[in-house]
Amino acid sequence: MMLVAVALSGCGGRRAAPLAHHLPPEIATAPSDAALLRVSRTGGTAQLLHANTLAPRETMISSGLPDVSRILGASVEDRTVYAADNKDRLLAIDLVARRSRVITTSVKQFITAPDGTILGIDSSHHPVRFSNRSFTTFKASVDRGATLMRGPADQITAVGSRPGTLEVLGGAGEVRRLNVPSGRTVATWVGDLVAVTTDSGVVFADATGRQKPPVRFVKIRGNPVLATFSPSGHRLYVALRKGTLVMIDRFTRERLRDLELPGPVDRMRVDRSGRWLLAHGSDDSLWVIDLAKWVVTASRVAAWADDLPQVVDGKTLLIRNRADVMAFDLDTPTLTQRGVLLGGASDLYIMLPWLPKATVASEAASPPVRVATPLADSSAVAPPPPAALPPATDAAAPPPAPTATGTIYLQVSSSQNQDWAQALAKQLKDGGFPATVLDPKNSDEGYRVVIGPYATRADADAVGRRLGRSYFIVSPGSRDT
Protein backbone atom coordinates (compact mmCIF):
# COMPACT_ATOMS: atom_id res chain seq x y z
CA MET A 1 0.00 0.00 0.00
CA MET A 2 1.16 3.50 -0.81
CA LEU A 3 1.37 5.90 2.09
CA VAL A 4 2.08 9.60 2.32
CA ALA A 5 2.98 11.09 5.67
CA VAL A 6 -0.49 10.67 6.98
CA ALA A 7 -2.60 8.02 8.69
CA LEU A 8 -6.13 7.35 9.72
CA SER A 9 -7.80 7.16 13.06
CA GLY A 10 -10.84 5.37 11.57
CA CYS A 11 -13.53 5.99 9.03
CA GLY A 12 -17.22 6.51 9.54
CA GLY A 13 -20.07 5.06 7.59
CA ARG A 14 -22.75 2.42 7.50
CA ARG A 15 -22.05 -1.00 8.91
CA ALA A 16 -20.33 -3.08 6.24
CA ALA A 17 -17.92 -5.91 5.67
CA PRO A 18 -14.28 -5.01 6.41
CA LEU A 19 -12.44 -3.40 3.51
CA ALA A 20 -9.02 -4.66 2.55
CA HIS A 21 -7.57 -1.27 1.65
CA HIS A 22 -7.88 0.72 4.86
CA LEU A 23 -4.62 2.12 6.14
CA PRO A 24 -2.90 -0.33 8.51
CA PRO A 25 -3.49 0.41 12.20
CA GLU A 26 0.20 0.24 13.09
CA ILE A 27 0.66 3.76 11.69
CA ALA A 28 -2.53 5.24 13.09
CA THR A 29 -0.59 6.96 15.87
CA ALA A 30 2.20 9.40 15.08
CA PRO A 31 5.71 8.14 15.96
CA SER A 32 7.61 9.78 18.80
CA ASP A 33 10.42 10.94 16.51
CA ALA A 34 9.50 10.87 12.85
CA ALA A 35 11.94 10.48 9.98
CA LEU A 36 11.70 13.32 7.47
CA LEU A 37 13.10 12.86 3.96
CA ARG A 38 14.49 15.96 2.27
CA VAL A 39 14.79 15.73 -1.52
CA SER A 40 16.66 18.29 -3.57
CA ARG A 41 14.28 19.77 -6.14
CA THR A 42 17.15 20.33 -8.57
CA GLY A 43 18.27 16.72 -8.26
CA GLY A 44 21.34 15.05 -6.88
CA THR A 45 20.70 14.33 -3.21
CA ALA A 46 18.21 13.00 -0.66
CA GLN A 47 18.81 13.35 3.06
CA LEU A 48 17.08 11.92 6.12
CA LEU A 49 16.29 14.37 8.95
CA HIS A 50 14.76 14.34 12.40
CA ALA A 51 11.29 15.80 11.88
CA ASN A 52 11.23 17.35 15.36
CA THR A 53 14.43 19.37 15.02
CA LEU A 54 15.42 19.20 11.33
CA ALA A 55 18.73 17.75 12.52
CA PRO A 56 20.40 15.43 9.98
CA ARG A 57 20.21 11.66 10.38
CA GLU A 58 22.12 10.53 7.28
CA THR A 59 22.46 10.99 3.54
CA MET A 60 20.33 8.46 1.66
CA ILE A 61 21.34 9.39 -1.90
CA SER A 62 24.48 11.45 -2.43
CA SER A 63 24.27 12.01 -6.20
CA GLY A 64 22.45 11.12 -9.41
CA LEU A 65 18.89 12.00 -8.41
CA PRO A 66 16.99 13.65 -11.32
CA ASP A 67 15.15 16.95 -10.98
CA VAL A 68 12.01 16.45 -8.85
CA SER A 69 8.85 18.53 -9.20
CA ARG A 70 6.60 16.76 -6.66
CA ILE A 71 6.80 14.03 -4.05
CA LEU A 72 3.82 11.71 -4.44
CA GLY A 73 4.02 9.15 -1.63
CA ALA A 74 5.99 6.44 0.13
CA SER A 75 5.57 2.67 0.13
CA VAL A 76 6.11 0.84 3.42
CA GLU A 77 6.32 -2.51 1.64
CA ASP A 78 9.25 -1.71 -0.65
CA ARG A 79 10.76 1.19 1.34
CA THR A 80 10.52 3.47 -1.68
CA VAL A 81 9.49 7.11 -2.07
CA TYR A 82 7.70 7.95 -5.32
CA ALA A 83 7.88 11.34 -6.99
CA ALA A 84 7.25 13.08 -10.32
CA ASP A 85 10.18 14.61 -12.15
CA ASN A 86 10.09 17.84 -14.14
CA LYS A 87 8.77 15.91 -17.19
CA ASP A 88 5.91 14.40 -15.12
CA ARG A 89 7.52 10.96 -15.24
CA LEU A 90 7.16 8.59 -12.31
CA LEU A 91 10.33 8.43 -10.26
CA ALA A 92 11.18 5.78 -7.64
CA ILE A 93 13.61 6.74 -4.86
CA ASP A 94 14.71 3.42 -3.35
CA LEU A 95 15.83 4.01 0.24
CA VAL A 96 17.16 0.43 0.61
CA ALA A 97 19.33 0.33 -2.51
CA ARG A 98 19.88 4.09 -2.12
CA ARG A 99 19.35 4.91 -5.77
CA SER A 100 16.64 6.32 -8.01
CA ARG A 101 15.10 5.19 -11.29
CA VAL A 102 12.51 6.45 -13.76
CA ILE A 103 9.58 4.03 -14.15
CA THR A 104 8.67 3.62 -17.81
CA THR A 105 4.96 4.29 -18.37
CA SER A 106 2.65 6.35 -20.56
CA VAL A 107 0.67 7.45 -17.49
CA LYS A 108 0.67 11.18 -16.72
CA GLN A 109 -1.14 13.65 -14.46
CA PHE A 110 -0.10 11.84 -11.30
CA ILE A 111 -1.91 12.80 -8.11
CA THR A 112 -1.85 11.42 -4.60
CA ALA A 113 -5.01 10.62 -2.65
CA PRO A 114 -5.02 11.62 1.04
CA ASP A 115 -4.24 8.02 2.06
CA GLY A 116 -1.22 7.96 -0.24
CA THR A 117 -2.65 6.03 -3.20
CA ILE A 118 -1.06 7.24 -6.45
CA LEU A 119 -3.48 7.77 -9.33
CA GLY A 120 -2.93 8.84 -12.93
CA ILE A 121 -4.44 8.91 -16.40
CA ASP A 122 -2.96 7.13 -19.41
CA SER A 123 -2.84 8.34 -23.00
CA SER A 124 -6.28 6.78 -23.72
CA HIS A 125 -7.88 8.62 -20.79
CA HIS A 126 -8.14 5.50 -18.63
CA PRO A 127 -7.57 5.95 -14.88
CA VAL A 128 -4.59 4.07 -13.47
CA ARG A 129 -3.75 3.17 -9.88
CA PHE A 130 -0.12 2.52 -8.89
CA SER A 131 0.69 0.35 -5.87
CA ASN A 132 3.00 -2.53 -4.97
CA ARG A 133 5.27 -1.52 -7.87
CA SER A 134 2.58 -2.22 -10.45
CA PHE A 135 -0.09 -0.38 -12.43
CA THR A 136 -3.79 -1.26 -12.49
CA THR A 137 -5.58 0.22 -15.50
CA PHE A 138 -9.34 0.75 -15.30
CA LYS A 139 -11.40 -0.24 -18.34
CA ALA A 140 -13.70 2.79 -18.26
CA SER A 141 -12.37 6.08 -19.61
CA VAL A 142 -12.80 9.52 -18.05
CA ASP A 143 -13.37 12.99 -19.48
CA ARG A 144 -10.39 15.01 -20.56
CA GLY A 145 -9.39 17.16 -17.60
CA ALA A 146 -11.14 14.93 -15.04
CA THR A 147 -9.92 14.96 -11.43
CA LEU A 148 -9.33 11.58 -9.79
CA MET A 149 -9.85 10.70 -6.13
CA ARG A 150 -9.68 7.47 -4.23
CA GLY A 151 -12.98 5.58 -4.15
CA PRO A 152 -14.17 2.89 -1.74
CA ALA A 153 -12.18 -0.36 -1.68
CA ASP A 154 -10.51 -0.79 -5.11
CA GLN A 155 -12.59 1.84 -6.91
CA ILE A 156 -11.74 5.32 -8.17
CA THR A 157 -13.91 8.42 -8.09
CA ALA A 158 -13.66 10.79 -11.04
CA VAL A 159 -14.97 14.35 -11.08
CA GLY A 160 -15.56 15.32 -14.71
CA SER A 161 -14.86 18.64 -16.34
CA ARG A 162 -18.57 18.94 -17.17
CA PRO A 163 -20.81 20.34 -14.41
CA GLY A 164 -22.59 17.81 -12.24
CA THR A 165 -20.61 14.71 -13.19
CA LEU A 166 -19.20 12.41 -10.51
CA GLU A 167 -18.41 8.82 -11.44
CA VAL A 168 -17.37 5.85 -9.31
CA LEU A 169 -15.30 3.47 -11.45
CA GLY A 170 -14.64 -0.21 -10.80
CA GLY A 171 -11.73 -2.23 -12.12
CA ALA A 172 -13.98 -4.45 -14.27
CA GLY A 173 -15.32 -1.45 -16.18
CA GLU A 174 -18.46 -0.76 -14.16
CA VAL A 175 -19.40 2.91 -13.77
CA ARG A 176 -21.87 4.42 -11.32
CA ARG A 177 -22.81 8.07 -11.93
CA LEU A 178 -23.99 10.48 -9.25
CA ASN A 179 -25.67 13.80 -10.03
CA VAL A 180 -23.95 16.51 -8.01
CA PRO A 181 -23.65 20.28 -8.45
CA SER A 182 -20.47 22.06 -9.44
CA GLY A 183 -18.18 22.96 -6.56
CA ARG A 184 -14.94 22.12 -4.78
CA THR A 185 -14.85 18.39 -4.16
CA VAL A 186 -13.14 16.39 -1.43
CA ALA A 187 -13.33 12.72 -0.43
CA THR A 188 -12.71 10.93 2.84
CA TRP A 189 -9.31 9.33 3.16
CA VAL A 190 -10.79 5.89 2.41
CA GLY A 191 -12.99 7.22 -0.39
CA ASP A 192 -16.37 6.13 0.95
CA LEU A 193 -17.93 9.62 0.98
CA VAL A 194 -17.52 12.69 -1.24
CA ALA A 195 -18.39 16.25 -0.22
CA VAL A 196 -19.09 18.96 -2.79
CA THR A 197 -18.95 22.52 -1.46
CA THR A 198 -21.38 25.00 -3.00
CA ASP A 199 -22.04 28.63 -2.04
CA SER A 200 -25.16 27.59 -0.08
CA GLY A 201 -24.10 24.34 1.56
CA VAL A 202 -22.47 20.94 1.14
CA VAL A 203 -23.62 17.95 -0.89
CA PHE A 204 -22.72 14.54 0.57
CA ALA A 205 -22.42 11.86 -2.13
CA ASP A 206 -22.16 8.23 -1.01
CA ALA A 207 -19.52 6.55 -3.16
CA THR A 208 -20.25 3.08 -1.77
CA GLY A 209 -23.76 2.88 -3.23
CA ARG A 210 -25.28 1.72 0.05
CA GLN A 211 -27.05 4.87 1.23
CA LYS A 212 -30.50 5.80 -0.04
CA PRO A 213 -30.70 8.42 -1.39
CA PRO A 214 -27.03 8.45 -2.41
CA VAL A 215 -26.84 12.27 -2.61
CA ARG A 216 -27.92 14.55 0.25
CA PHE A 217 -27.71 18.33 0.55
CA VAL A 218 -26.93 20.14 3.82
CA LYS A 219 -27.67 23.86 3.82
CA ILE A 220 -25.01 25.93 5.59
CA ARG A 221 -25.47 29.63 6.27
CA GLY A 222 -22.48 31.86 5.60
CA ASN A 223 -21.37 30.97 2.05
CA PRO A 224 -19.08 27.90 2.26
CA VAL A 225 -15.94 28.04 0.13
CA LEU A 226 -14.04 24.79 0.81
CA ALA A 227 -14.06 21.77 3.11
CA THR A 228 -11.89 18.92 4.34
CA PHE A 229 -12.61 15.68 6.15
CA SER A 230 -11.03 14.51 9.39
CA PRO A 231 -8.72 11.49 8.90
CA SER A 232 -11.41 9.23 10.37
CA GLY A 233 -14.05 10.71 8.06
CA HIS A 234 -16.58 11.29 10.84
CA ARG A 235 -16.19 15.08 10.77
CA LEU A 236 -16.26 17.57 7.89
CA TYR A 237 -14.65 20.97 8.46
CA VAL A 238 -16.12 23.73 6.28
CA ALA A 239 -14.58 27.18 5.81
CA LEU A 240 -17.03 30.03 5.24
CA ARG A 241 -16.35 33.06 3.06
CA LYS A 242 -15.90 35.58 5.89
CA GLY A 243 -13.50 33.40 7.89
CA THR A 244 -15.52 30.99 10.03
CA LEU A 245 -14.71 27.29 10.46
CA VAL A 246 -17.73 25.00 10.86
CA MET A 247 -17.70 21.43 12.18
CA ILE A 248 -20.24 19.06 10.57
CA ASP A 249 -21.10 15.54 11.76
CA ARG A 250 -21.02 13.28 8.68
CA PHE A 251 -23.57 10.88 10.20
CA THR A 252 -26.25 13.27 11.46
CA ARG A 253 -25.17 16.11 9.10
CA GLU A 254 -25.62 18.51 12.02
CA ARG A 255 -23.69 21.76 12.39
CA LEU A 256 -21.90 21.06 15.66
CA ARG A 257 -19.59 24.03 16.30
CA ASP A 258 -18.41 27.32 14.78
CA LEU A 259 -14.98 28.89 15.21
CA GLU A 260 -14.15 32.43 14.13
CA LEU A 261 -10.83 32.59 12.30
CA PRO A 262 -8.66 35.69 11.86
CA GLY A 263 -9.60 35.88 8.16
CA PRO A 264 -10.87 34.07 5.05
CA VAL A 265 -9.35 30.70 4.13
CA ASP A 266 -8.23 29.43 0.72
CA ARG A 267 -6.49 26.16 1.72
CA MET A 268 -6.90 23.66 4.57
CA ARG A 269 -5.43 20.32 5.65
CA VAL A 270 -5.74 18.13 8.74
CA ASP A 271 -2.71 16.30 10.10
CA ARG A 272 -2.71 12.51 10.22
CA SER A 273 -3.47 12.33 13.94
CA GLY A 274 -6.66 14.35 13.46
CA ARG A 275 -5.60 16.79 16.18
CA TRP A 276 -4.48 19.79 14.11
CA LEU A 277 -5.99 21.69 11.20
CA LEU A 278 -3.90 24.14 9.18
CA ALA A 279 -5.82 26.96 7.51
CA HIS A 280 -4.16 29.25 4.99
CA GLY A 281 -5.21 32.78 4.03
CA SER A 282 -4.72 34.50 0.68
CA ASP A 283 -2.01 36.74 2.18
CA ASP A 284 0.05 33.68 3.25
CA SER A 285 -1.30 33.84 6.78
CA LEU A 286 -1.29 30.42 8.44
CA TRP A 287 -3.52 29.55 11.38
CA VAL A 288 -3.05 26.43 13.48
CA ILE A 289 -6.33 25.11 14.92
CA ASP A 290 -6.35 22.63 17.82
CA LEU A 291 -9.40 20.55 16.91
CA ALA A 292 -9.58 18.89 20.33
CA LYS A 293 -9.79 22.26 22.10
CA TRP A 294 -11.48 24.03 19.15
CA VAL A 295 -9.24 27.10 19.32
CA VAL A 296 -6.73 28.88 17.10
CA THR A 297 -3.47 28.19 18.90
CA ALA A 298 -0.99 29.98 16.64
CA SER A 299 -0.62 32.28 13.66
CA ARG A 300 2.34 32.46 11.29
CA VAL A 301 3.24 33.64 7.79
CA ALA A 302 3.93 30.66 5.54
CA ALA A 303 3.64 29.82 1.85
CA TRP A 304 1.39 26.87 0.95
CA ALA A 305 2.51 23.85 -1.09
CA ASP A 306 1.70 20.15 -1.40
CA ASP A 307 4.30 19.14 1.18
CA LEU A 308 4.47 22.13 3.55
CA PRO A 309 3.21 23.53 5.85
CA GLN A 310 2.61 20.29 7.66
CA VAL A 311 2.28 18.90 11.17
CA VAL A 312 4.64 15.96 11.51
CA ASP A 313 4.84 13.45 14.38
CA GLY A 314 1.65 14.97 15.86
CA LYS A 315 3.43 17.80 17.63
CA THR A 316 5.83 19.62 15.29
CA LEU A 317 4.84 22.28 12.76
CA LEU A 318 7.05 22.60 9.68
CA ILE A 319 6.76 25.71 7.52
CA ARG A 320 8.66 27.51 4.80
CA ASN A 321 9.76 30.95 5.93
CA ARG A 322 11.16 32.81 2.92
CA ALA A 323 14.24 30.77 1.90
CA ASP A 324 14.28 28.58 5.00
CA VAL A 325 12.34 25.75 6.64
CA MET A 326 11.51 26.05 10.32
CA ALA A 327 10.25 23.58 12.94
CA PHE A 328 8.06 24.68 15.88
CA ASP A 329 6.93 22.74 18.92
CA LEU A 330 3.13 22.73 19.10
CA ASP A 331 3.24 21.52 22.70
CA THR A 332 4.51 24.92 23.87
CA PRO A 333 2.20 27.95 24.22
CA THR A 334 4.44 30.23 22.16
CA LEU A 335 5.49 27.71 19.48
CA THR A 336 9.08 27.27 20.59
CA GLN A 337 11.41 27.01 17.61
CA ARG A 338 13.09 23.60 17.48
CA GLY A 339 15.17 23.87 14.33
CA VAL A 340 15.82 25.70 11.07
CA LEU A 341 17.29 24.80 7.68
CA LEU A 342 18.79 27.80 5.94
CA GLY A 343 18.08 27.57 2.23
CA GLY A 344 15.84 24.56 2.73
CA ALA A 345 12.68 26.12 1.28
CA SER A 346 13.66 25.20 -2.28
CA ASP A 347 13.64 21.46 -1.49
CA LEU A 348 10.79 18.95 -1.03
CA TYR A 349 9.82 17.00 2.10
CA ILE A 350 7.91 13.89 3.15
CA MET A 351 7.59 12.23 6.53
CA LEU A 352 8.28 8.51 6.28
CA PRO A 353 5.99 6.00 8.02
CA TRP A 354 9.09 3.94 8.88
CA LEU A 355 12.69 4.49 9.97
CA PRO A 356 15.39 2.99 7.74
CA LYS A 357 17.24 0.13 9.46
CA ALA A 358 20.69 1.63 8.98
CA THR A 359 19.53 4.76 10.78
CA VAL A 360 18.05 2.74 13.66
CA ALA A 361 21.32 0.91 14.15
CA SER A 362 23.51 4.00 13.96
CA GLU A 363 21.34 6.00 16.34
CA ALA A 364 21.32 3.19 18.88
CA ALA A 365 25.10 3.52 19.06
CA SER A 366 25.23 7.32 18.86
CA PRO A 367 22.30 9.69 19.62
CA PRO A 368 21.78 12.40 16.98
CA VAL A 369 23.33 15.81 17.43
CA ARG A 370 20.60 18.47 17.53
CA VAL A 371 22.04 20.76 14.85
CA ALA A 372 20.01 21.82 11.84
CA THR A 373 22.09 21.89 8.65
CA PRO A 374 21.35 22.44 4.97
CA LEU A 375 22.16 19.93 2.25
CA ALA A 376 25.70 19.68 0.94
CA ASP A 377 25.12 22.21 -1.83
CA SER A 378 24.13 24.95 0.65
CA SER A 379 26.74 27.00 2.44
CA ALA A 380 24.82 28.51 5.36
CA VAL A 381 24.44 26.68 8.67
CA ALA A 382 22.02 27.84 11.36
CA PRO A 383 21.91 25.88 14.62
CA PRO A 384 18.53 26.07 16.33
CA PRO A 385 18.12 28.15 19.46
CA PRO A 386 18.04 26.25 22.77
CA ALA A 387 14.66 24.62 23.24
CA ALA A 388 12.69 26.42 25.92
CA LEU A 389 11.31 24.22 28.67
CA PRO A 390 7.53 24.40 29.00
CA PRO A 391 6.11 25.74 32.23
CA ALA A 392 5.76 23.28 35.06
CA THR A 393 2.56 21.25 34.83
CA ASP A 394 1.05 18.18 36.37
CA ALA A 395 2.14 16.13 33.33
CA ALA A 396 4.17 13.83 35.56
CA ALA A 397 1.13 12.93 37.63
CA PRO A 398 -0.54 9.65 36.72
CA PRO A 399 -3.69 9.99 34.63
CA PRO A 400 -7.02 9.31 36.31
CA ALA A 401 -7.83 5.60 36.32
CA PRO A 402 -11.05 4.35 34.72
CA THR A 403 -13.89 3.59 37.12
CA ALA A 404 -16.28 0.67 37.07
CA THR A 405 -19.24 3.03 37.59
CA GLY A 406 -18.10 5.81 35.25
CA THR A 407 -20.27 6.99 32.40
CA ILE A 408 -17.86 9.23 30.45
CA TYR A 409 -15.68 8.01 27.58
CA LEU A 410 -13.20 9.51 25.12
CA GLN A 411 -14.16 8.58 21.57
CA VAL A 412 -11.13 8.52 19.27
CA SER A 413 -12.47 6.74 16.19
CA SER A 414 -15.60 5.56 14.39
CA SER A 415 -14.95 2.96 11.70
CA GLN A 416 -16.99 0.81 9.36
CA ASN A 417 -14.19 -1.76 9.54
CA GLN A 418 -14.53 -3.90 12.68
CA ASP A 419 -11.09 -5.46 12.32
CA TRP A 420 -9.53 -2.02 11.96
CA ALA A 421 -11.31 -0.75 15.10
CA GLN A 422 -10.20 -3.78 17.13
CA ALA A 423 -6.61 -3.33 15.99
CA LEU A 424 -6.65 0.35 16.94
CA ALA A 425 -8.11 -0.47 20.37
CA LYS A 426 -5.33 -3.01 20.94
CA GLN A 427 -2.74 -0.44 19.92
CA LEU A 428 -4.13 2.04 22.45
CA LYS A 429 -4.22 -0.66 25.15
CA ASP A 430 -0.59 -1.47 24.48
CA GLY A 431 0.11 2.22 25.02
CA GLY A 432 -1.53 2.14 28.44
CA PHE A 433 -4.98 3.49 27.54
CA PRO A 434 -8.08 1.45 28.57
CA ALA A 435 -9.60 1.28 25.08
CA THR A 436 -12.59 -0.77 23.96
CA VAL A 437 -14.78 -1.02 20.86
CA LEU A 438 -18.48 -0.15 21.04
CA ASP A 439 -20.53 -2.05 18.46
CA PRO A 440 -22.95 -0.09 16.24
CA LYS A 441 -26.48 0.28 17.62
CA ASN A 442 -27.95 1.03 14.20
CA SER A 443 -26.96 1.08 10.55
CA ASP A 444 -25.83 4.73 10.66
CA GLU A 445 -23.10 4.10 13.24
CA GLY A 446 -19.63 2.62 12.92
CA TYR A 447 -17.53 0.64 15.37
CA ARG A 448 -16.49 3.27 17.91
CA VAL A 449 -13.13 3.07 19.67
CA VAL A 450 -13.45 4.62 23.13
CA ILE A 451 -11.25 5.04 26.20
CA GLY A 452 -12.65 4.83 29.72
CA PRO A 453 -15.06 4.97 31.40
CA TYR A 454 -14.38 7.90 33.73
CA ALA A 455 -16.50 9.42 36.45
CA THR A 456 -16.25 13.05 35.27
CA ARG A 457 -15.52 15.03 32.13
CA ALA A 458 -12.50 16.54 33.90
CA ASP A 459 -11.00 13.08 34.44
CA ALA A 460 -11.64 12.19 30.81
CA ASP A 461 -10.09 15.45 29.58
CA ALA A 462 -7.00 14.79 31.68
CA VAL A 463 -6.47 11.55 29.80
CA GLY A 464 -7.31 13.21 26.48
CA ARG A 465 -4.54 15.75 26.96
CA ARG A 466 -2.06 12.87 27.18
CA LEU A 467 -3.53 11.07 24.21
CA GLY A 468 -1.94 13.21 21.47
CA ARG A 469 -4.84 12.83 19.02
CA SER A 470 -8.26 14.32 18.47
CA TYR A 471 -11.02 13.01 20.73
CA PHE A 472 -14.61 13.68 21.74
CA ILE A 473 -16.27 13.13 25.10
CA VAL A 474 -19.25 10.80 24.87
CA SER A 475 -21.62 8.91 27.14
CA PRO A 476 -22.47 5.26 26.40
CA GLY A 477 -25.50 4.92 24.18
CA SER A 478 -25.43 8.56 23.07
CA ARG A 479 -23.82 10.60 20.30
CA ASP A 480 -23.16 13.51 22.62
CA THR A 481 -19.76 15.14 22.15
Image: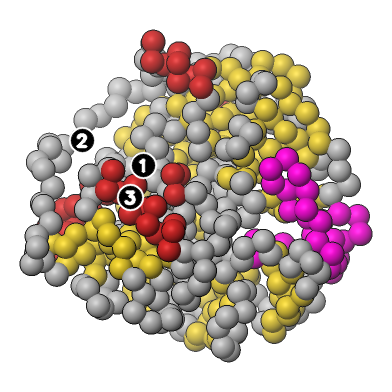
Give x and y (percent) for residue 230: 45, 62
Dot 3 alpha-carbon crowd within 10 angstroms: few under 14, some 14 to 19, many 20 or more: some
Magenta-drawn segment: 122-151
Q: Which of marks 3 and 2 is nearer the N terminus?
A: 2
The answer to whether 217 is drawn above or below residue 343 in the figure is below
User: Looking at the picture, which amino acid does disc 2 mark?
Assistant: Pro
Contact check, label 3 and label 2, Cβ < 8 Å: no
| Residue at numbered disc 1 | 315
Q: Which of marks 3 and 2 is in front?
A: 3
Q: Is mark 1 on a helix, strand or loop?
A: loop
Circle nearer the N terminus (1, 2) = 1
At label 3, the amino acid type is: Lys
Residue displayed at 51% across by 64% down: 18
Disc on res. 426: 3
Question: Residue 358: where, in percent of width, then height?
Answer: 52, 17
Taking the spot 27% from the left edge, 59% from the top edge, the residue there is 436
Q: In this view, does 262 lie to the left or right of 146?
A: left
Q: Which mark is residue 41?
A: none
Q: Mark 1 or 2, which is nearer the eye? A: 1
Q: Is residue 44 in view from this perspective?
A: no
**Residue 325 spot, x, y in % from top left:** 51, 32
Q: Which residue position is annotated with label 2?
A: 390
Q: What residue type is labelled 1?
A: Lys
Q: Residue at x 79, y 76 (%)?
A: 162
Residue 140 within the segment the image draws in magenta: yes
- Whole-angstrom CA distance, mark 1 to mark 3, is 23 Å
Taking the magenta stretch, the answer to whether it contains residue 322 is no
Measured as percent of width and height from the top left, residue 326 is found at 46, 33
Of circles 1 and 3, the one toward us is 3
Q: In which quarter of the image is the C terminus?
A: bottom left
**Considering only order in the chain, which callout, 3 or 1, is on the residue closer to the N terminus?**
1
